[in-house]
């Protein structure tokens, strides 16, 4: 590029545009070097001072989709997580599903007694008689991060549940961990508090190389909302029936028949789903 271009991020903050960041996000989809460089060149030619990250995303997404839908599906992963909203409940089920496929037994939306009051817990995950309670903080809008108030509040709830749990003499399982999960990011103070309080924090890209996006890619556990072929109505139908993962739709293909999907579209949808399910 001839000069640095300032872009407007989803948070409204100005930042220098990074061609390397765009290039890496495109490589992450599985697109080959030639396609990546072609898209980078196209986007570079269309940049202007003050362009939004959303406009850049839309252009790159359209070029990927034109070439291969599965590349576009992987590229839209972050936006697909936002599309699980607006209530946040599908996000809780999505996190529960991620952990189920990672070897945990999970329950979503459970009431647990605390020493002081009862608590509605988003996800409970169990493995080897060790129980983890997980609170999910979902943001349906980009640019909003979790500040220190969130882990502070959730840590106090965890301690209340733990105090009651450990008072039960008949309990054979150990309440070992408390987690806070968000689809956006944590502020630096939130991360500091989580570390100090031994509260596990999981966000879009934290911990490094083990954030939500890394786990999804590694396990091939993409949300149904990444599909570029399913319509919004079809996605809503599936989410209402607790189908939050592409992998679940692959197992329950009959749901496409309930939707009245034509055989031609069915082949395209299942081809896309199959490629996404193979990490």
Image (cartoon, helix red, strand yellow):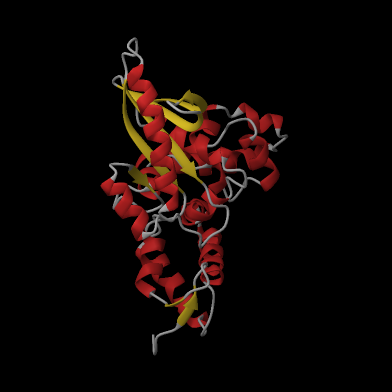
Q: Nearer the viewer, residue 114 or 177?
A: 114
* 196 vs 188: above or below: above
Name the image quarter holding residue 265: top right
Return the residue found at the far right.
Answer: 260
Return the residue found at the far front.
Answer: 116
State left or right for residue 132 relative to residue 91.
left
The N terminus - image quarter: bottom left
Q: Position of residue 197 (x, y in %)?
A: 29, 44
Q: Position of residue 47 (x, y in %)?
A: 50, 81
Q: Position of residue 143 (x, y in %)?
A: 51, 63
State left or right for residue 238 relative to residue 120.
right
Q: Residue at x 40, y 43 (%)?
A: 180
Q: Nearer the viewer, residue 164 or 206?
A: 164
- Kindly tell me whether residue 220 is visible in this rendering: no
Q: Nearer the viewer, residue 149 or 221?
A: 149
* 30 vs 268: above or below: below
The C terminus - image quarter: top left
Q: Position of residue 105 (x, y in %)?
A: 40, 23
Q: Residue at x 55, y 68 (%)?
A: 54
- Kindly tell me whether residue 250 is visible in this rendering: yes
Q: Residue at x 54, y 59 (%)?
A: 65
């Amino acid at each position: 590029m001839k000069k640095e271009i300032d872009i407007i991020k989803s948070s409204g903050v100005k930042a220098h545009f990074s061609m390397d960041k765009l290039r890496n996000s495109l490589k992450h989809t599985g697109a080959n070097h030639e396609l990546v460089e072609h898209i980078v060149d196209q986007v570079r030619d269309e940049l202007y001072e003050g362009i939004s990250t959303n406009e850049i995303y839309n252009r790159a997404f359209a070029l990927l989709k034109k070439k291969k839908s599965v590349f576009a599906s992987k590229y839209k992963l972050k936006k697909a997580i936002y599309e699980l909203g607006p209530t946040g409940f599908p996000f809780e089920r999505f996190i529960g599903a991620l952990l189920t496929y990672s070897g945990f037994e999970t329950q979503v939306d459970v009431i647990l007694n605390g020493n002081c009051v009862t608590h509605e817990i988003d996800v409970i995950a169990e493995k080897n008689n060790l129980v983890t309670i997980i609170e999910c903080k979902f943001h349906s809008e980009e640019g909003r991060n979790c500040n220190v108030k969130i882990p502070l509040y959730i840590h106090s709830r965890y301690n209340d549940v733990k105090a009651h749990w450990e008072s039960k003499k008949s309990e054979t399982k150990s309440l070992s961990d408390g987690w806070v999960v968000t689809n956006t990011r944590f502020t630096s103070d939130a991360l500091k508090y989580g570390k100090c309080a031994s509260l596990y924090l999981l966000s879009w890209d934290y911990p490094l190389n083990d954030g939500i996006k890394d786990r999804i890619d590694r396990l091939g556990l993409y949300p149904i909302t990444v599909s570029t072929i399913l319509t919004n109505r079809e996605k809503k139908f599936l989410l209402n029936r607790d189908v939050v993962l592409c992998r679940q739709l692959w197992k329950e293909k009959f749901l496409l028949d309930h939707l009245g999907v034509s055989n031609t579209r069915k082949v395209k949808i299942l081809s896309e789903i199959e490629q996404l399910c193979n990490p």
